Amino acid sequence: MEVKSHKEKKIKMQLQCPMPKLDFEVITLGHGSGGLLTNRLLDSGVFDLLKNEVLDKRHDGATLNLNGKTAFTTDSFVISPIFFPGGNIGELAVNGTVNDLAMCGAIPQYLSLGFIIEEGLTMKEFWDILVAIKFACDQAGVQVVTGDTKVVERGKGDKIFINTTGLGALHPKAAIDIAHVKAGDKIIVSDNLATHGIAIMSVREGLEFETTIESDSRNLNHIVKTLLDDFGHDIHLLRDPTRGGVGTVLTEIARDSRLGIDINQKHIPVDEQVYGACEILGLDPLYVANEGIFLAIVDGDVADEFLKKIKSLTHCQNASIIGEMVETHPRQVILTSGIGGKRVVNMLVGEQLPRIC
Amino acid sequence: MKFLTEYRDPEVAQRYLEEIKKTVTQPWTIMEVCGGQTHSLVKNGILNMLPKEINMVHGPGCPVCVTPLNLIDKAVYLAEEKGVILCSFGDMLRVPGSEKSLLEAKANGADMRILYSPLEAVKIAQQNPDKQVVFFAVGFETTAPANALSVVHAHRLGLKNYSILASHVLVPPAIEAVMEDDESHIQAFLAAGHVCTIMGTLEYYPLVERFKVPVVVTGFEPIDLLQGILMTVRQLENGEAKVENQYSRMVKEEGNPMAQDTIYEVFEVTDRLWRGMEVIPMSGYEVKEKYAEFDAKRKFNVNIPEAPENQECIAGEIMKGIKKPFECQHFGKKCKPESPIGAPMVSSEGACAAYYHFSGMLEKIEEEQAL
């Protein structure tokens, strides 16, 4: 039911934010000139939509009040297609950076927002992206406090690229550090794997297939805050397995912790439709990108309690303990297959390419 | 998931494993012909579950691996031609040509499209009448009907801008080549289930007759493979050599006649060079004269000199089952998926890549390197 209300909110937001009347329909090079046209583009509602005290000053930069330990991250978004089932590049750009902050154990507060627009992007498309940004910011409770807009010639970009940088104060109970990871810790995944990657794949040129799979792009900061409130230092590491998927992140954790990892295929949650699509396309869900899940490595003593708690939270109903940190086979991830065989999980090389047959 | 979980049931798998253990009394070397089977064997950890008497050896059934170097060079050349859109299945892209791979050509600006179906390429040709669309038609008998169908469609639509760069190879002649090799020690074959879905099982009777080896047509799921191995071991232990069909839910004796008709409408059987191996007589498909205008080799008349193969790669010995990937001195060291010396390290169905990704050999190599 929660998922539905998220969608309803999104639709309501889109209805509430009609595109302002403009004397241009398409963004051209001039809109990135920094002059009159740039101002018209921004005045067309960008400032109104993302309104807040700091942004409203329209200065070259933002002046912020920061206290104590602060997390700082940046990410660029170049996804194609920019609109996909379940979202668009706008919310991805907000959620991606918000989630990177959350994975540090921080409470995300401020974002910068940089656009590189290829001329020819329609104002309608740009508006839809802005509304998604606004929606995602509201959901996550963050403010866009500074930004930049550039327009490049046709053929020099791919419709729109977005960069966001984020700042957030560390949760007082957070102690996220790879050095805290020890043998006996349990590895918990917050929800189903591979949903985002398969949603994107389903609309890529040449690969289109009919499905109702939607991207799971969402902010994870409130979930993480709740868990940190309750479990604090017992959460040793948080990672969001975006590109490269869970498999790649696990190999990184094994490498950096100098410990081994054992995971069991039968405990790895994948939605049935996504699983089917992976089978048809010849992709391994372990390497498919995610946008709405995270991995938590928690003290073995609290793992069951942690699982109980996380399963009670929105978008975490399928959370599962997928494995544990071990002292044997250091730096290696070993997966027990569905039929009980064992194999090594390696880092993904380049992109996962679809098989011939 | 229906039709999948049944074939991945751990209890059933265990029963088959026990049955195999009970049946086997001496060492046997069995070749799984198809790369998809190798992939499944290692992905599911089956190789380590089998009794040590059973030695599974990977066969030449990876289309990416056996596509000749010169053909990849041709594809790269065409992709870099102005006005050409080159369409390909995904896993051809990383295969090294003599100078570069298709992926590198793409990075240099070539218009490359990754497709699942050749019919998509026909669609792209319709949408881009000012461009020449070339589909890199790679595969065994399995992909041949769809590739042929794309030519039939393009012909029907009267398209002048569609052609295929055919690189089709056939399984039975490859089995013959493996058995004729003096160094071969293969005692039985798991034949490729999907190839037989198209072609049926009749082609295998003469092979069984001639070489006195069991051939069991086998599927790709863990239970399929275990059942196929059990059927093979039973034959071997009983001193039998016959064609059996494990994959009967898909494979009929006569195959799929409609698919075969489509193949023979467009293709004819010719001698073929297999990368890493040699020219195997009557082991490939080329486009018939009737459809010459859809044959990229004739249409573009690309003459690229034959480049020498990288001598360090022992792909031929691996694909004939004479050596295993980790017996290659470069495996996991100089030759890795991110920097392959030869094709079997590229495709997920290539023997070397499958072993590299999924089996524990890496650890061994790192230990060796540390010493």
Image (spheres, grey):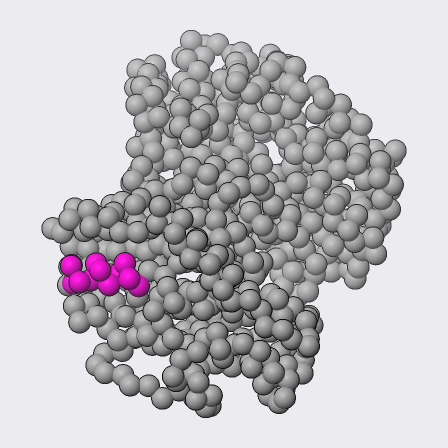
Is A124 on the left or on the right of B2, as rendered? right
Is the residue A303 above or below the residue B43 in the image?
A: below
Q: Quadrant of residue B117?
A: top right
Q: Quadrant of the C terminus of chain B?
A: bottom left
Spot occupied by residue B133 in the image (x, y as percentages of width and height): 77, 50
Spot occupied by residue A294 in the image (x, y as percentages of width and height): 32, 56
Is the residue A309 above or below the residue A239 in the image?
A: above
The answer to if A226 sits in the magenta stretch is yes
Q: Nearer the viewer, residue B352 or B155?
A: B155
Q: Residue at x 51, y 67 (%)?
A: A17
Spot occupied by residue B36 in the image (x, y as percentages of width and height): 51, 34
Magenta region, main secondary structure: helix
Q: Residue at x 58, y 78 (%)?
A: A44
Q: Quadrant of the N terminus of chain B?
A: top left
Report the magenta residues as a range: A221-232
Q: Residue at x 84, y 39 (%)?
A: B157
Q: Nearer the viewer, residue B105 or B159?
A: B159
The answer to if B151 sits in the magenta stretch is no
Residue A10 in sight from this viewpoint: yes
Is A351 on the left or on the right of A308, as rendered? right
Is A61 on the left or on the right of A333, as rendered? right
Residue B225 in sight from this viewpoint: no
The residue at the far left in this view is A301
Q: Nearer the viewer, residue A45 or A278?
A: A45
Is the residue A42 above or below the residue B166 in the image?
A: below
